[in-house]
Image (spheres, helix red, strand yellow):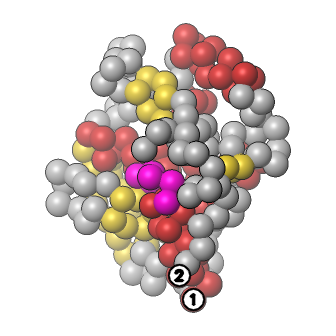
Amino acid sequence: MTVHPITITGEPVLHRRAQPVEAFDDELRALIADMFETMDTANGVGLAAPQIGVGLRIFVYGMENDDDVPARGVLVNPTLVTSKVPGADPDPDEEAEGCLSVPGEAFPLKRAEWARVSGFDGDGAPVEFEATGWFARCMQHEYDHLDGKLYVDRLNAKHARRAKKATKNNGWGVPGLTWMPGVDPDPFGH
C-alpha cells in the first residue's frame, strides 16, 4: 500500500465530476487499499479518489456510527439520497466541518441529518445503507467530492467569505498544490 499526496483546493480534479469506475479488478482494489492507507495516515474519516488526483467515483470512510454500518468501508459508483437540509444557520460549535483538501481549516455547514447510500464495494458487490448524524455528514461530504464540490462551495455567504480569505492567505486555489500525510505536519494537529 502507498500513501499518496492529498490535493489541495484549486487542483482541477477536485472541481470536476469524477468518472464512473468501469472495471472491478486488481488495479481498483490496489487503489482502494492505497486510499485507506492515505486516509489513515492523514487521520481522516473519509477520502475520495479525486483527493489523491484520481478522477474516479470512489470514496473510502472510517467512522464509528450508530447506524449498524461497518465502521470502515468503500463505495464505488455511489448514489446518495438525503433528507431536506435545514434552512437555519449552522451552529459554529456543533456543525463545523473540515476537509483534507482544505487542510487545517474548518467552517460551519448545515447538512441533511439522514442519507441513504448505495453503490458497490471493491469487488462489485452491491452496498446499501442508511446513515444519520455525523455519519450522514461524512457520506454527503465524500459524495460531493465525486461531483466536483468541496464543502466550502456549500457555505453560507458569511462563512464563504472566510473560506475565500483562508484560501487566499494560504496561497491555495491554483493547480499543483498537495500535502503529504506522514511527512508534512498534520494540518489538523492530530
Which of the 4 image quadrants contains residue 54?
A: bottom right
Other residues around mark 1 within 10 Å, as few (<14) / some (14–19) / many (≥20): few
Contact flag, marks 2 and 1 (Cβ < 8 Å): yes
The percent coordinates of residue 178 (x first, y second) are 71, 49
Which residue does the image show at 72% across and 22% down from the upper left? 169
The residue lying furthest to the right in this view is: 175
Which residue does the image show at 38% across and 18% down from the upper left? 92
Query: Which region of the structure is painted magenta?
Result: 41-47
SS label for mark 1: helix
Q: Is residue 41 above or below residue 112?
A: below
Number of callouts in the render? 2
Mark 2 and mark 1: Cα distance apart in space: 5 Å
Left or right, 173 with reference to 129: right
Inspect the image, locate mark 2, and give the three-letter code of the amino acid beneath it. Answer: Arg
The residue lying furthest to the top in this view is: 158
Instruction: Check the picture and name the quadrant holding the C terminus.
Output: top left
The percent coordinates of residue 102 (x first, y second) are 60, 37
The residue closer to the viewer here, 30 or 132, is 30
Q: Is residue 40 above or below residue 10?
A: below
Inspect the image, locate mark 1, and give the three-letter code of the amino acid beneath it. Answer: Asp
Left or right, 122 with reference to 70: right
Q: Is residue 157 above or below residue 190?
A: above
The tag on residue 136 is none
Left or right, 57 with reference to 69: right
Q: Which residue is mark 2?
A: 29
SS label for mark 2: helix
Q: Which residue is mark 1?
A: 26
The percent coordinates of residue 103 (x first, y second) are 59, 38
Based on the picture, tell me whether residue 114 belongs to the magenta stretch. Answer: no
